Amino acid sequence: MRLRRPAVAGMFYPFNGDELKASIEESFFHRIGPKKKSPSVEAIGERVVLVSPHAGYMYSGPVAAHGYYACSYLKSVELVVIAGPNHYGIGSGVATVREGVWETPLGKVEVDGNSAKRLVESSGIVDFDDSAHMREHSIEVQIPFLQYIFGSKFKILPISMMLQDMSTAIDVGKAIANCVKDKKFLLIASSDFTHYEAQEIASRKDSEAIKAILQMDVLKLYNVIENLNVTMCGYGPVAAIITAAKELNITNGKLLKYATSGDITGDYSSVVGYASILFQ
């Protein structure tokens, strides 16, 4: 079985397992994190959709922790679908992997080969292509948080999107819905928001994009991105996940946390925006 080794351990998050656990816990208890990590006995169901950031943990980890704290209420998860942008321009336009195991410093998680096959068969766009995933961090950085919460009791379906136009995103979203409709699932769209603009400008632009996401209006999201020049890197994955959620009658959205890199570093002159958004 093919093994994908971590590409950004030691850069986006610690290479050592104990240090990685400590980094995740620091994200939960950070001043802009949820300040807690253990859920109560309350459960939120078995079908959840999440938008989560993918920068280095020191920057976006506390915002991501809000989403993963909410997901820790899940009764159980069979399959985690993670769609993220392809930052490196390597491989197919939209790619999953046929099978294999993904490794992080916290252990290994298995790709759901049956779901991957079903995804490719359901879509006219998605290919099998390992090369699209080998260097990409947007999917990888979600997995340690998942392992921290769920252990190894889940499989993944990774989807790398170099093509992020609206028709592609809708196709991928409908194919995702077809793959998970009979499963207990968590769908994750991995995306950061505005890149390298002043805090006031980034927050204004991102608030409009977040409004469109919460309204689950894919066309409006694309219009906001184009009209305001929002440098959101994972808009395609977000649109795909919104499409899947609507197909699955998941319509209750909530912004859990928005913050920027400036809220971490104190430098508000050039920031990156991060958001955790939950649909259930």
Image: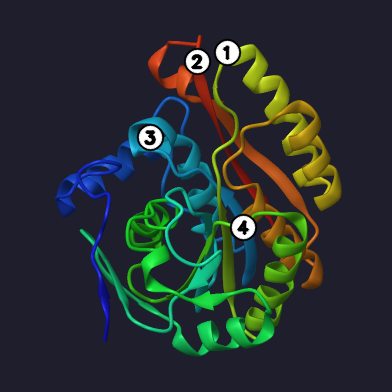
Residue 165 seen anywhere in this rendered image of the structure: yes
| Spatial CA span between label 1 and label 4 | 28 Å
Sort mark 4 into few (<14), some (14-19) or many (20+) by Cα contacts within 10 Å. some
Percent from the top left, x then y, of residue 11?
24, 41
Label 4, on which residue?
Answer: 163
Q: Earlier in the sequence, mark 2 or mark 3?
A: 3
Q: Position of residue 257 (x, y in %)?
A: 59, 35
Which mark is nearer the camera, 2 or 3? 2
Q: Are marks 2 and 3 in contact (CB under 8 Å)?
A: no
Whether pointer 1 and pointer 3 mark residues with C-beta atoms closer than 8 Å, the reply is: no
- Give the residue number, with chain letter if any, for mark 3: 29
| Mark pair 2, 1: CA separation | 5 Å
The residue wearing badge 2 is: 270
Secondary-structure class at tag 4: loop
Question: Viewed as shown, does residue 102 lie left or right of 194?
Answer: left
Q: Secondary structure at mark 2?
A: loop
Tags 2 and 4 in contact by the CB under 8 Å rule?
no
Assess whether mark 1 and mark 2 are in contact (beta carbons under 8 angstroms).
yes
For marks 2 and 1 on the same chain, the one whose residue lies earlier in the sequence: 1
Q: How far is disc 2 from disc 3 in space, using C-alphas?
A: 25 Å
Residue labelled with disc 1: 198
Nearer to us in this view, 152 or 1? 1
At mark 1, the secondary structure is loop
Which x, y percent locates residue 270? 50, 15
Looking at the rendered image, the quarter that the N terminus falls into is: bottom left
Which label's residue is closer to the chain start, 1 or 4? Answer: 4
